Image: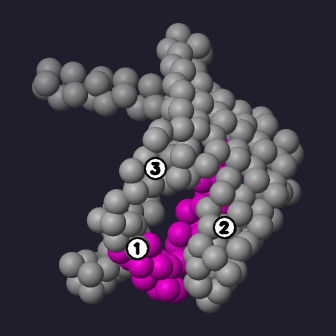
Amino acid sequence: MTVVLIALAILAGVLLLLAVPIDLAFRCRGIDAPDAQLRLRWLFGLLRIERHWPRPVRDASAPAAAKKRKNRSRGLALLRQDAFRQRLWRLLKDLLRALHIHDLALQLKLGLGDPADTGRLWAVVGPLSAVLQGRRNVRLDLQPEFVDAALEFDAQGRLTLIPLQYLALALVFALSPPSIQAWRSLRTHHG
């Protein structure tokens, strides 16, 4: 009985900690040579973390490029499944609703190198930007690139989120029938 009470007390403590909001301030830009800064405050300022990731010098290697192409084709295979795409869209909307935006500015140029694939991706990104654009304290400049593969961005903002909400949303998404079916089909076809 004592072990059960201790386990319940630990679980309650963990859930209580996950219910404490996290405040994030960030600035990031670039993909090939990213430059990012992050400031995190948790437990009402008792825990503070600041990180800076400067632009690294990269050596482009063929195996890394091949792996990126393989991962992109897997991601596109998932997005081609209608039920999964709808469930992903619902998850993104839920995540945005749970996010408390104090200030957000985003410039994004996005393209997959194939107009049809870019159009499919933009079918998700476009409405998502409309959802964000309607929020206070949000400034967006999103541009599709239909001819070449491109991912250029510059983002900065200050946000608050509650980890427990995000954990619950991620679990519901991962355990949903469309997600389970999509992961199984991906493993079967690409395994």
* Residue that mark 1 sits on: 69
Q: SS for tag 3?
A: helix
Question: Whole-Å distance between the Cαs marked 3 and 2?
Answer: 30 Å
Q: Is residue 28 visible?
A: yes
> Which numbered disc, 3 or 2, marks the residue closer to the eye?
2
State the mark number for residue 110.
2
* Residue that mark 3 sits on: 168
Front residue (pair 55, 92): 55
Decide: few, some or many residues near mark 2? Use Cα within 10 Å; few <14, some 14-19, many ≥20: many
Residue drawn 30% across and 23% down? 9
Question: Whole-Å distance between the Cαs marked 3 and 1?
Answer: 31 Å
The amino acid pointed to by label 1 is Arg
Residue drawn 72% across and 37% down? 157
24 left or right of 140? left
Q: SS for tag 1?
A: helix
**Horizontal and vertical percent position of residue 40:** 56, 25
Front residue (pair 54, 52): 54
